[in-house]
Amino acid sequence: MNSSNSGNVGIVIVSHSPKIAEGAADMVRQMVGSAVPLAWTGGDIDGGLGTNVAGILEAIETAWSPAGVAVLVDLGGAETNSEMAVEMLPEDRRARVVVCNAPVVEGAVIAATESSGGSPLAAVKRSAEEFYA
Amino acid sequence: MSLDRAAREKLVRALAESVIQHADELTSLDQAIGDGDHGLNMKRGFEAVLATLPGLADKSLPEMLKAIGMTLVMKVGGASGPLVGTFFMELGKALPEQSIRADLVAATAKAIDAVKARGRSEAGQKTLLDVLVPVQVVLAVGGDAKAIAAEAAQAADRTTPMLAIRGRASFLGERSIGHMDPGSRSASLLISAAVKVLEFEASS
């Protein structure tokens, strides 16, 4: 997990596999350096494959930016748990976190690239979702 | 329906045991059409719920249900955590402290709507909703504990020939046909355990 301070939209990567989440984060870093707040999370609370709400909340906190946070997810449970995590955020933050309907690796790279140019949250989400649409 | 502390603890233990004792069965159902973690995930979640006893049973029934839901959301993992957890949390929110059957009917309807919203799903897609929805109908028309438990078991059976449209099993398309939905099975186990305790309390 890592982050950086900037006014750019933060990126959170959520995968069932911690290795995929970390690897995707490495690819994002290679593309955009430290211009974008970034965090990843993966695995269930026992360290097996899966996702967990607490880990996602922590990642959102790590990648938090006043511009908001875009969450990239892999399979169903990652999406459901991410949506649950968003609902559990304090109300003033809830509207500034979006779960993107995009492939996790490609979506994360595209979203981070868009964010690094200073685009707002809606544009970051749109770019990630349009890439494979 | 008013459950004293002992009855609330009994309810929690019955719910947890129903899932924990069937963890292997749930896992093998999930291995057939999912990712094979349902039994383990649900077991972990309900073991975490048990770990919050005895304090958990000191709470009122609505507060206790909310706390169970929150523990499941945080500990189960997989899509089942938020789905089953949401059901318990919303049931707790909608249920008054002193509730009659009509309150339970209304509260379960609300909790089911919340599960539908969380999963963006409806009955007929081979998910736990295929048990929750028909069981709620039996509850609403006045069915007794036996009728409710029977409907839960039959409803889970009816998911076997269904084509999965939501959840990991939907990736399999037609190959999802012929296997019972694991989420429906765990919902049916929980419902049977709950009505058994509630029936005993109502008659004692």
Image: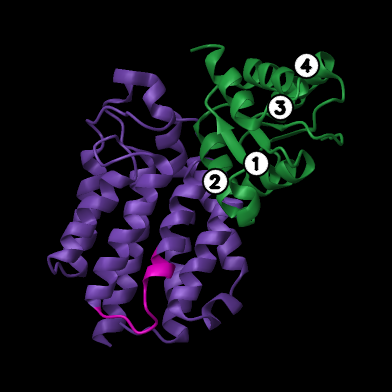
Chain colours: A green, B purple
Labelled pair 1, 3 in contact (Cβ < 8 Å) = no
Same subunit: marks 4 and 2: no
Same subunit: marks 2 and 3: no
Q: Is residue B200 above or below residue B15?
A: below
Residue A93 located within the stretch drawn in magenta: no
For the image, the number of numbered tags is 4
Labelled pair 2, 1 in contact (Cβ < 8 Å) = yes
Q: Quadrant of the N terminus of chain A?
A: top right
In x, y percent, where is residue B125?
29, 34
- Give me the C-alpha separation between circle 1 and circle 4: 23 Å
Circle 3 chain: A
Residue B95 located within the stretch drawn in magenta: yes
In x, y percent, where is residue B187?
36, 52
Which is in the foreground here, disc 2 or disc 1? 1
Labelled pair 4, 3 in contact (Cβ < 8 Å) = no
Query: Which residue is identified by label 4?
Result: A27
Q: Magenta residues?
A: B91-100
- In-front residue for pair A122/B133: A122
Which is in the foreground here, disc 4 or disc 2? 4
Circle 4 chain: A
In x, y percent, where is residue A114?
70, 19
Check disc 2 and report its element: helix, strand or loop.
helix
Query: Which residue is identified by label 3?
Result: A21
| Residue A105 falls left or right of residue B40 | right
Badge 1 amino acid? Asp
Q: Which mark is residue B41?
A: 2
Query: Which residue is identified by label 1?
Result: A44
Residue occupying the point 68% across, 36% down: A69
Residue occupying the point 51% across, 64% down: B68
- Give me the C-alpha separation between circle 2 and circle 1: 9 Å
